[in-house]
Image (tube, rainbow, N blue to C red):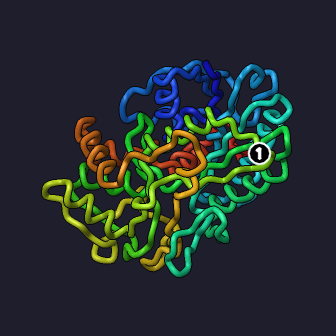
Amino acid sequence: MKKVLIIGHQGYLGSILTHYLQERGYYCVGADIGFFQYGVLYPPKQVPMIDKEARTITAEDIKGFDVVLMLAGISNDPFGNLSYEEIYNPTRDYAIRVAKICKKLGVRFIFPSSCSVYGDGGDGSQLDESAPTNPLTPYSLNKLQIEQDLTDLADENFSPIALRFGTVFGSSPRIRFDVVINMLCGMAVAEKKVVLNSDGQAWRPHIYIDDVCESFRCSIDWTYNGGRLVVLNVGRNDGNFKIIDIAKLIQSEVDGCELHFSSQSSEDEIDDLVKDRKIQDGVDKRTYRVSFDKIHEVLPGFEAKWPVEKGVKKLIKDLERWKLNQKKFKQREFYRLQQIEYLFETQQIDNNLIFL
């Protein structure tokens, strides 16, 4: 039985990934700072925990594990009066600090990166792992910087893996409603409307959360020892959609649901929680289509089994089963940036994002 340490197990992905791996015979232990532990849509499965977080975990804590999954990190742009450096430099520092410990101990290190590192896909062709990167947000730049640090750290004794995920969607005990499909499905179920903050013409690759979990499982078991960082785009080629087409798909799955654009709606109708702060004047410059051929060729056993259409149906059914209403949909804890801002403004955390 392989022992897996999941740093950041109480987030959106970690909450479902721990259960996914446990069901398949892996021994999982979590470590988390707890920013999002109370944003619960349905009860999460219990997992043994180390009373540490990414910045305080030590070699003694990691010793004995076969794999570390480094999920901890900030998933949104800087906020309040904190700069990019104050938010993301620590994230980069502790990711590489943990990677160095793993290297010393001979523990596999798997890092969740993002297809958002491609930024603007230019002519609309599908981008593979060799395509130029063009991160347009601090979040995507941070992911790319950590990839570069892992490239420098890799050698014949340390072969880390970076999984560049499409935009993840699907049910989780600690679901996020600030990612596009989850947000639009939440609107449709709770409010019988889908509101787009842009013209909807931007392309995105989307991946269902179970396929994300499966990519981690296959990476844990992979005997890769190539002596360098391996980067894999994770998703399905038919998962590249324009946002407008995603919105129309979701609208069609919920009876009585209407499609609106923010330019047609009053400010009162558009809650701050569901606005995308990276969209300016109705245009989202982050547009990219991605090729997922490589992962299906090189990662043993991996298959992305969930088409977007099937995943959307499942998510809507889950949200209806859990009786999602407007109050629950707008709960602050389901929106990462707003939750961190709240903890900061109420003086529960300091400028170093440490609980007081």
Q: In x, y percent, where is residue 92?
A: 75, 50
At label 1, the amino acid type is Gly
Q: Residue at x 63, y 60 (%)?
A: 140
Q: Residue at x 51, y 34 (%)?
A: 17
Determine if residue 269 is in view: no
Q: Nearer the viewer, residue 168 or 345?
A: 168
Q: Considering only vertical position in the picture, is 305 above or below 164? A: above
Q: Horizontal placement of 338 versus 103: left or right?
A: left
Mark 1, secondary structure of its residue: loop
Query: Total number of numbered labels?
Result: 1
Q: Residue at x 54, y 42 (%)?
A: 215
Q: Horizontal placement of 58 versus 278: left or right?
A: right
Q: Residue at x 53, y 50 (%)?
A: 296
Q: Nearer the viewer, residue 298 or 334?
A: 298
Q: In x, y percent, where is residue 297?
A: 56, 51
Determine if residue 262 is in view: yes
Quarter residue 349 falls in: top right
Q: Residues within 10 Å of mark 1 (few under 14, many from 20)?
A: some
Q: Which residue is mark 1?
A: 226
Which quadrant would the N terminus be assigned to in this image? top right
Which quadrant would the C terminus be assigned to in this image? top right
Q: In x, y percent, where is residue 165?
A: 54, 53
Q: In x, y percent, where is residue 98?
A: 77, 37
